[in-house]
Image (spheres, helix red, strand yellow):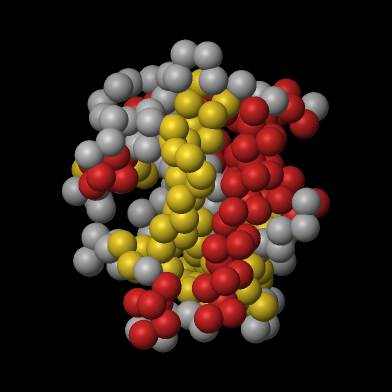
Amino acid sequence: MQRLERLYEGKAKIVYRTDDPAVYWVQYKDDATAFNAQKRGTIEGKGALNNQIAAIFFDYLSKAGVENHFIEKASDTEMLVKALEIIPIEVIVRNIAAGSMAKRLGLEEGTDLACPVVEFCLKSDELGDPLINRSHALALRLATPEQCEYLEATALKVNELLQAMLKQLGIILVDFKLEFGLHHGRVMLGDEISPDTCRFWDAETREKLDKDRFRRDLGGVEQAYQEILSRLGKGIG
């Protein structure tokens, strides 16, 4: 597999074309952003950690029947993925009130929710990824009714699978963001699953083990990401 020209560079990853039009080459960066890129920084080793963490999660989900874009790791910081035409909807699943939901609804952070909450957001950095609903998605032709159903059902399935996996490792899955895309007309999970896109708390101490440590200047960011990888490694070892 040969890496060709850069196709896209985002806040956390660079996507390259390859000599196979159905495959992209993704490089994870150490760059860190928060609050729609208003806060920027570097987390040493983040690219390698997120690449390895995402690979573990994608492999686990694939074996559990959740189709996704992951093919294989190409290096410590790179992976090969199926080329997706991204659906411009971010799907967020929340098990515990935190972050923007807690602020928006006036809830104390850490409040357990009676059931998982699925949110759709328009994928637009310029607009701050605004909250939308299924009617918006259909009216704006962002997705079909069948695709909206698939996004929500798959997000809830991913939630169940990840919660079961992480519970054994002493980790609470607070919330997470997913992105999906089309590969030869099939909808499948894409982007990444990592401490950049999830809120992970230690089950005993409720210590934050994710990008909130960067957002809130809590320190120990690299150590938190390393802790997630370490526990995942023990879980599959």
Furthest residue to the top?
205
Total marks placed: 0
Whether residue 230 is visible: no
Query: Does residue 158 appear left or right of residue 91 in this picture?
Result: right
Whether residue 63 is visible: yes
Residue shown at the point (56%, 76%) measured from the top left: 147
Q: Nearer the viewer, residue 163 or 86?
A: 163
Where residue 120 sits in the image (x, y, percent)? 41, 63
Residue shown at the point (35%, 84%) measured from the top left: 140
Query: Does residue 1 appear left or right of residue 135 in this picture?
Result: right
Q: Is residue 94 above or below residue 125?
A: above
Where residue 134 sits in the image (x, y, percent)? 42, 73
Quadrant hosting residue 215 = top left
Residue shown at the point (60%, 30%) measured from the top left: 229
The quadrant the N terminus occupies is bottom right
Where residue 116 sits in the image (x, y, percent)? 51, 46
Where residue 55 sits in the image (x, y, percent)? 66, 46
Q: Is residue 176 above or below residue 97?
A: below
Q: Is residue 235 above or below residue 184?
A: above
Residue shown at the point (35%, 77%) measured from the top left: 136
